[in-house]
Image: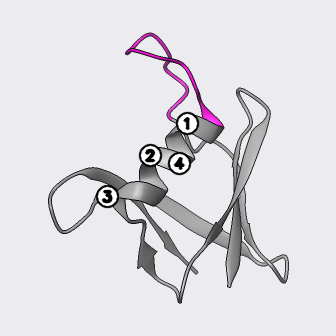
Amino acid sequence: MYVRLRNDFHNTSIRIRVPSLPYTLSGHQSRRLRRALCGASGLGCKCGVVRGAAHSEAGKRLSVYPDADDLGRASWTIAE
């Protein structure tokens, strides 16, 4: 299944593949998401990366919240 995440501050979005919900993004997915949604280098941007609605392929609104992966790296968890 695919999920679309948005950042309304920068007017960007990205489509991420997840096997099922709830799902915590992998380190690679988290880095890809951060580059695509914010792209600001350094700590100067205060957008929060995921700032806007998240939807499934079927258009269902999903919850996204900051979390950490198994190694303790910053990530996001997507749930229904």
- Mark 2 lies on residue: 31
Question: Of helix, strand and loop, which one carries label 1?
Answer: helix
**Outermost residue to the bottom:** 20
Q: Which residue is mark 1?
A: 35
Q: Residue at x 36, y 54 (%)?
A: 75
Residue 76: quarter of image: bottom left
Query: Are the residues at dot 2 and dot 4 in contact (C-beta closer than 8 Å)?
Result: yes
Give residue 38's quadrant in the image.
top right
Pointer 2 and pointer 1: residues touching (CB < 8 Å)?
Answer: yes
Q: Is residue 39 magenta?
A: yes
Q: Is residue 18 visible?
A: yes
From mark 2 to mark 4, how far is it between C-alphas? 4 Å
Instruction: Give the distance between the C-alpha atoms of the residues marked 3 and 2, in whole angstroms.
Output: 14 Å
Q: Marks 4 and 3, how far apart in space?
A: 16 Å
CB-based contact (under 8 Å), mark 1 and mark 3: no
Q: Position of residue 73 (x, y in %)?
A: 22, 51
The span from disc 1 to disc 3 (Cα, nearest Å) is 17 Å
Q: Are marks 1 and 4 in contact (CB under 8 Å)?
A: yes
* Relative to 75, residue 18 above or below: below
Horizontal relation, residue 29 to residue 66: left or right = right
- Indicate the position of residue 36 as horizontal and vertical percent values: 63, 40
* Residue at (44% x, 52% y) in the render: 30
Q: Which residues are magenta?
A: 37-48
* Label placed on residue 67: 3
Quarter that holds the N terminus: bottom right
Secondary-structure class at tag 2: helix
